[in-house]
Structures are given as C-alpha cells and as structure tokens.
Image: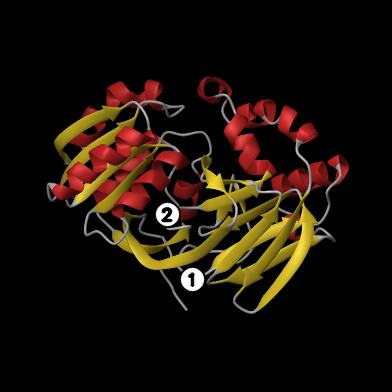
Amino acid sequence: MRASVIINERSSRTRKHLAELPGLLTARGIEIDSFTVVPHEKALRKRLKRVVKDGATLAIVGGGDGAMTTACDVLAHETCALGLVPLGTGNSFALTLGIPDNVPGALDVIAAGRVVNVDLGTVNGTHFANFATIGLSAEIADEAPHALKAIIGRLAYAIGGVRSFFTHRAFRAKIRWDSGKKQIDTQQIVIANGRFFGSQPVTPDATITDRRLALFTTTGVSHLEVARMYVAFGLGLQTKLPDAIVVSSREIVVKTSPKQLVSIDGNTLGKTPARFGVAPRALRVCVPANFDDARD
C-alpha cells in the first residue's frame, strides 16, 4: 500500500505525534510517497490538489475536523481515498466513521485497507464532512483560541465561548426543507451530514450513509434556555427538550435576520443565507471492519 501523507501543523495534537508518524506508517506496511507538513488548511488544500493531480490513490491526512472537511471538499467525487489520522480537538468525523481516537488505532484502520463511499454535506457549493452550525456555535468556534485548544482541548471552546454566550442575540430563522417550512426565533442551528456534534449524536438515527441531513435547533433564546440546551447535548438528551425542533431532509435552506455566521466542522465559511444538500457516496474513505455501510 502506497500513500501520500499530509499533516496539518496547527492541529492540537500534531506536535505530540508528528515525529512518530513515519515509523508507525512504515511498520504497518504503508509506503510513503511523500510526507508533507502544512502550516494551515489553505496550504493543505493546495497540497492535496497536487497529490490528486499526480494520481495518488490514497491520501492520509492528519488533523482535526477542519482539516478533514477541507480534505473532503478536495477529494469529493475523486478516485483518491482518504485515510484519517485524528489529531484535532473534537474529531467528530473520525467518531462518525468509528475510527479510534488514537494514532496507532487510526493507522491500523488505514492499513487494513477497507474503503467505502460515504455521503458528504454541501453548503453553498462547499462540501463538508460532519456538521455545520449557524449562529451561536459558529461564533463560539470562531472565537476559540487556537493555541489554547492544543493545551486544554475541548475546554478551549467553553473558555472562548464565554463572551459569545453573553453577547450573542437571538435571530429570526426561516427554515425550508423537502416537506415543510418553519419560521422561528433561535440562538443557533446545527445541520449534520454525519452522526456526531462533538461527542454526541445530533439525532438518534443520524448516519453518514443515509443520504439525508439532520437539523437540530431550539426556540429557547434566553441564557438559561441556551445553557440548558448545551447541558442536554452533553448528556445526549437534546432531542427530548420541549422546545426542540428536529428535521431530516435531503435539502435544507436557512435564511436569517440578521445575517449569521455559518461554520463547517469548526471553520467559518461565511454568512447566511445557506443552502444545504447531500452529495451521495461522494467520498472514498478508509473505515474499520465493523463500519455499517447499510443504506436505504
């Protein structure tokens, strides 16, 4: 097995594991065509495009969810497969695919050689791996200190989000999907292609192979109600909240007043309006033997 390896230097766990990666890859019979460390996701995109153009059949990308969504956007509808090495803070995409959150375990998955096609989400023409957020969570992701994530992990989002939690204001959202529409006041909206938002499923039945998006939001806009929503998410009880709104659809359009930040897998993409869709079976990716590839 041959692979081109690209590692995002800025990911929170890169420094800890970078030196050991070449040896771990070689020990698993993976021949390294090239090994590149890039300083940010823009450079990752450029390097990965070159790797694909050069005819690589496997690109191993090390980084967090932001790096993975960049890789997915480049590799969408390509024959080159993606091998994930989770080096970020949340690693929700790896969790969705059942890939271990440790480097040796993730490399074992790649070395085993099972490749399947999974769905990708799209928003305003850009592919994303796992989830998109609109409003408060997008602002919190934008404010989280990058250097702090390398030290304290997910707690950096909580620290970086304190100001946003108290200053962000509710907005009016017009949501339209395949079979309905709704107008609400809310603080945030989560739209997932994959299964997880952080470490919890967005909805109980969300998967990355069902050709559908899962939307979750609430109509509670006070600080107490927003805090309750985050606590419920942490406990996996968010869909049981009395003001929860859950939608499953192939296409979702969100318009807001005023305009809100849109973030994909922790990276700011732009502002609303946002049109979401599904690119079925758009990504070839290495998965564990027990990954369920069942489809409707």
- Residue, x 83% and y 60% (percent of image)? 243
**Left or right of residue 96, residue 240 in this image:** right
Above or below — where is 182 with respect to 158? below
Residue denoted by label 1: 210
- Residue kind at label 2, given as amino acid type: Thr
**Left or right of residue 46, residue 133 in this image:** right
**Left or right of residue 204, residue 292 in this image:** left
Task: Count residues near mark 2 (Cα–Cα under 10 Å), then give few for <14, some for 14-19, many for 20+.
Answer: some
What is the quadrant of residue 189 in the picture? bottom right
Of tags 1 and 2, which is closer to the observer? 2
What is the quadrant of residue 16 in the picture? top left
Above or below — where is 138 with respect to 287? above
Task: Count residues near mark 1 (Cα–Cα under 10 Å), then give few for <14, some for 14-19, many for 20+.
Answer: many
* Kind of element beneath mark 1: loop
Residue 33: x and y in percent read 13, 38
Mark number for residue 126? 2
Residue 94: x and y in percent read 44, 47
